[in-house]
Amino acid sequence: MSVLYGKFEMPQTIKVEEDSSTFARFIAEPFERGFGHTMGNSLRRILLSSIEAPACVGIRIEGFLHEYMAVEGIVEDGTDIVLNLKNALIRCVPTDDSGMARSQKVITTDVDVTPEMLHSTQYSVRLKDLVKNTDFEVVNPELHLFSITKPMKVRVELRIAYGRGYIPSERLVIRDKMVNEIIIDGIFSPVRMVNYRVENTRVGQDTDYDKLILEVKTDGRSSPREALSFAAQIALQHLSPFGKVEEKQIVCEEEQRATNTDREALLGKLSQRINEIELSVRSTNCLDHAGIRYIGELVVMRENDMLSFRNFGKKSLGEIREKLTEMGLGFNQADRMAEYGITSKNIVQMIEDYLQQRAEAASEAQPPESPMKGE
């Protein structure tokens, strides 16, 4: 059962300015009065506290028994090396389909310094020397960790863990701790700064609606776009239980009319037949042999699936991609279709039902034939 509510003014798109790998400014408008601060403060708190990233939480260097020890041939003592290592920035986003787990990982590297490598009487060991050929990406590869002053071979083991926020070393849970391993404070949060402000914006003749301006700065382990997207999803997950308190869904009046109109316009595009979009004979024949009749069957497919069709190549794929772009569509748009209850399984049935409804409506709209004279 749905409850009809009045329309809320909400942003349809988010404008992004000064977009880079570490800084971005997001502008969202319009909001109802007060909602700018509600959204801005909520997103800011989540961004600063709850975005996850990998960090180095332990190190074991051959010859070091504890962090206050010095070893002949290495300039820095254990404390200096730990302080340098706290600035290490390592990036990796584990996903469900990548097989990448969030468990702690130990990276073992043998640093072998030969006489030829001792430029200016010492060799600088950098972060890129210890983290290579792994699943991790080094954001600051030139970070200096320690210097070696004589030919030697030393084994270094780094422990990488995932977490959020800041966790002091005494609170870290270390699995299978190595002998003589030095535990380091976990600095997991990739978000360095979040500012937001709310300004007035105009909707029609009213000028008291909210415009939210959100500035996000990260250290490179996560881009500002990724961080904001993750924060929004975390907020939605925490709000979803409250929506189940009462099993009645609200539908905004204007939104309902707009959704129906958008759905009709979308189905009008999806119901076009392949032979109506002026493809080359080769592309049309390939799709025909694959049993694809409507545009809607294309937009729920991935490009790799298209290339698996017989005699279907990249040239044909590019041609179809261009045609879909002209129509405001594209490949792999299952998420967009899901908003209207359309999936890859029911797309053909939805199109055929739409065409039948349109044919019936056109038939009812035709005036009855007038009787012939003389009858």
Image: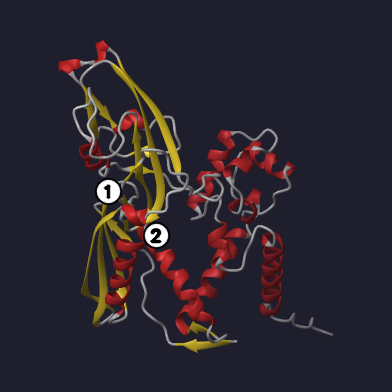
**In screen coordinates, is 173 left or right of 371?**
left
**Residue 210 seen in the figure:** yes
Quarter of image, res 231: bottom left
Q: Position of residue 233 (x, y in %)?
A: 44, 64
User: What is the secondary structure assignment of the residue under circle 1?
Assistant: loop
Using a 10 Å C-alpha cutoff, classify the residue at mark 2 as few (fewer than 14 neighbours), some (14 to 19) or many (20 or more). Answer: few
Q: Amino acid at mark 1?
A: Asp
Q: Quadrant of residue 39?
A: bottom left
Q: Where is the C terminus found, in terms of image quarters?
A: bottom right
User: Percent from the top left, x then y, of residue 260?
Assistant: 54, 75
Left-right relation of 342 to 81: right
Identify the residue shown where x is 44% and y is 47%.
93
Q: CA distance from mark 2 to mark 1?
A: 16 Å
Which label sits in the foreground, 2 or 1?
1
Can you identify the residue that label 1 sits on? 219
Q: Please rate how many residues cluster around mark 1, counting C-alpha atoms within 10 Å: few if below 14, some from 14 to 19, many from 20.
A: some
